[in-house]
Image (cartoon, rainbow, N blue to C red):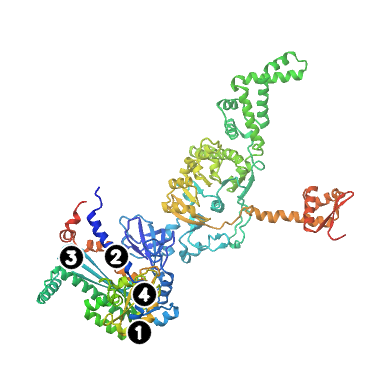
Amino acid sequence: MRSLDQGLQDLLSAVNNILSVREKNRPDRGKIRRRLQAEVGAIRRAVPLTPDTIKKLAGGRPLVGVDGSVTAYGALFPHIIHLFRALASTTAQSVEEGLYLVDLFYPELEDHRQEIEEAVARAAAAGENLAPEAVLSQIVRARLAALEVRAAREALEKYRPFAVFFDGGFLRYGTLAPAQWQEYRELALEMGVVSIGVIEEIGTFDLARKILAGPGASPPFTCDRDLLFGVLEPGEWLAVRGELELKKTYYTCFARPGAYPGAVAYDFFREQAHRAADFIPLLFGLTPRGGRGIPWWLDQVDRAVRISRPEMELLLATCLDRGLRERFFVPRRERRSL
Amino acid sequence: MQIVGHTTQQEVYAASRQRPFRINEILLLEDERHNYPLGEVVETQSFNRYIPLATERSELVDRQVMENLAQLGYDIGVETIHLARIRILAELTSPVSVGIPLRVPEFKEIRDLFLPQDPHRGLVLGVIRGTEELTASLPPDLARVALLYRKGEGILPQAGVPFIMDHWTLPEYPHIGIFGGSGSGKSFALRVLLEELMKQQLPVLVLDPHFELSFTEPFPELPPAYREDFSRRSTVLLAGRDVGVQFEELDAPDLINLLRAAGEVTENMHNAILTLHQRKDSYASFRNRIRDLTRGLEEEQELKRTLKASDDPREKQEAARLLALVERYKDRVGHVSTLLAISRRLNRLENERIFTGNIEPIREAIMNRRLVVVQGPVWFLQVLGAYVIRKFYRERRQYQDAGQTGEEAQKFPPFLVATDEAHNFAPRSPEIPAPARSILRTIAQEGRKYGVFLILATQRPALLDDTITAQLNTKLIFRTVRSSDLEVIREETDLGPEEVRRLPYLTSGNAFVSSATHGRTIAVRIRAAKTVSPHSRHPFAELAEDFVPEEERLRELLLQYLPLGDFNFDVHLSALQQELKRRVTIDEITRVLEDLVEEGVVEKKEMVLGVEYRKAGNG
């Protein structure tokens, strides 16, 4: 039997060293809390939710959760099919009976080929050399975001909800599908629908930079997720002061809804920032205490929107000729015998 | 409701969000291609994927979250999906179409499936489970024929399509088995079945080792319109008092069969009986012949001496008679021990009162198309039953065969034999002596030809003779727990694995009917009986009602007779006995008085003449 690779062991141990040193040097929890309160905003405890407050918030209207999924089939460019599905579901019915939108992207379709070529040309004009594969992944991200936003927009009119929860932050929609997002935003604001992006994995660095900067400088890559780990008590949230403008057009605050010590973040439209204090108890009340910090409804939407493997296989078996599938989409390494 | 998933020509799955499926219910599949087949639900499930079994992969749903969601109009109940496995009740040649809807049929759409027989020409045993929803669409002549009963709730209205057993098919599919553990409703079902046979005026011989099958006491709370008087259609006879074997009627083979019940009959004994038994022998004449012959053999030399030397002519005459017997039978009966063994067996039968009375009352009832119940201890019934059944079967056969050959023979009707604890009458193990086994086997195998049928109830099908079990074409199967019995049921019936799995959990009165006539298993709830066993009272209730009052009456009387004591017990004893109409002892009186003393009602004083009991507080 081969022994455990010594070279890799050494490299990994170095990683462990760095992390353990960082953990040792991490400022204590009380200090981080004090700094946060001073620099960022008050740490508040959300008031427990009562049936009355829910009724008042909802005003008899339902809640909508929005999520999307993308599944790729194939291995080598250009023979990769992406299947998109977005779902906006209301709590007035079963999660699977929500509003579904679907899309497909395949580089060999005429429109889609042009789309790729145009993007490559645009990049070239800007002096950038982009491979079609790289363009494809951008297009896929953008299409998914656009589809989700469209679903959300249609749900506004179809279900007339009091709030829409998105699985993920607002920056993605604003960057990848700006036009659709703008349209959604205007309609939601007009209808008074409070929109909230629930971020499970916080990817920003702003708080860490603020708090840990200064004398005794911080390690360069500490992100907000690491900073906030274990800092908030269950049921607490960090009411970021409005003027901080962590994200330009959005208002973001941080929270620990349940037992898991990591924090989540909630994005609001800036115009609706003042509703945060009302909606955070609702968000907490809809999040299982033992869970990952995601409202239960969003979890269900996430589950329902995903194209499961059996579903995918059935789709392929139904619509693609077996010979074509083998010829174009099954990579040779899948045929390797072990 | 919709057909989902893979389908076959025999089995499909159906799903519904609104309506839970019921086990055994019949549904109509709107499959035009297959001419709208019917299906029976054989397995049901409901699940809600949000309320799963807690596993490491799916955390239990947080109740608080659900309550808050409920405020937003979300009902987790809508996520419940009801599933059913459905067995198709028709022979299709291709799988059922997927995605087609199903619905609850109207009664007229399934009538043929359930009612092969007119209710007045069949045995109404109960209702078919799973047809509750069809009750409303039943025609009036079927709507009130089978009231139900549930312990604690009393008589309930009929819910479902009546289950009507077609006894006209018995010649084709003979014999009925009723299997089920104690308390499963098996004896109850036997009663209901016998009631129905009486309504059809079929002659039935019932062997009742439990002394419970009489049909004169109406079931309590039964609505008057539903009551029925069976007193003129049934006769109850007590073995050893009302009926027995008339010795004079026996021929030697009969006698040998009877003796087998009392112990092994060896080849030598067999020969001895054939030699010694004479037609029209009475018990006394046969027994005396054996006794005399035994004495003759034992005392042969002495008797010869007496014959030669004795002065007493009576003695000589007696010796001559015995020696003549010895002379006549000596070479053919073997050893004295053989005769002694025969005597012992004979004695046992006589002691059990087998030879008291005759079987004429049974014959009379059968000839008059009545149901005749013979009650007695199991052993007695085995002996008597074997004899009677063999005799009747022979007569029936002779009559029918004579009809075919054109000879004259005594008329004898077709009849049924029913018994509980059938495994005692025909045990599977050949080591257990069972006088009735061979005749029951014969009837099981060829009785249909002569119109003689068996109804055998047992709680231990595994212990019942397997040749017989295999011939029971209709089986009512109640709750069964023992694995050996379940094994027999699995082998001998068409119950599917899911039905066998349900058997240990059936509640009292529910059964599966596996019948060659139906070609499938039907789940049935047995109807309320119209009559009740005379001793169905709980033994503790009996204590409270019959035994405590006896003592209380004695207490009341004693209080009237105070003061009492050793000096006057005997004076009052006979008066007490007369009042209570039973024997009362001084011991009993003393015990009751001591109880009263303990309770402070009576005072006890030691007097010159012995103890005296007085009313307390009288100084």
To which residue does mark 4 refer? A31
To which residue does mark 3 refer? A80
**Front residue of A321 and A143:** A143
Q: Amino acid at mark 3?
A: Ile
Q: Amino acid at mark 4?
A: Lys
Q: Earlier in the sequence, mark 4 or mark 3?
A: 4
Q: Amino acid at mark 1?
A: His
- The numbered disc on residue A274 is 1
Q: Earlier in the sequence, mark 2 or mark 4?
A: 2
Q: Position of residue B402 (x, y in %)?
A: 51, 38
Nearest-to-viewer mark from 3 and 1:
1
- For disc 3, the chain is A
Q: Position of residue B140 (x, y in %)?
A: 50, 64
- For disc 4, the chain is A
Judge left or right: residue B346 versus residue A132.
Answer: right
Q: Is residue A17 above or below residue B460?
A: below
To which residue does mark 2 refer? A19
- For disc 1, the chain is A
Q: Secondary structure at mark 2?
A: helix
Q: Amino acid at mark 2?
A: Leu
Mark 3 and 2 residues: CB-CB less than 8 Å, in contact? no
Q: Earlier in the sequence, mark 1 or mark 4?
A: 4
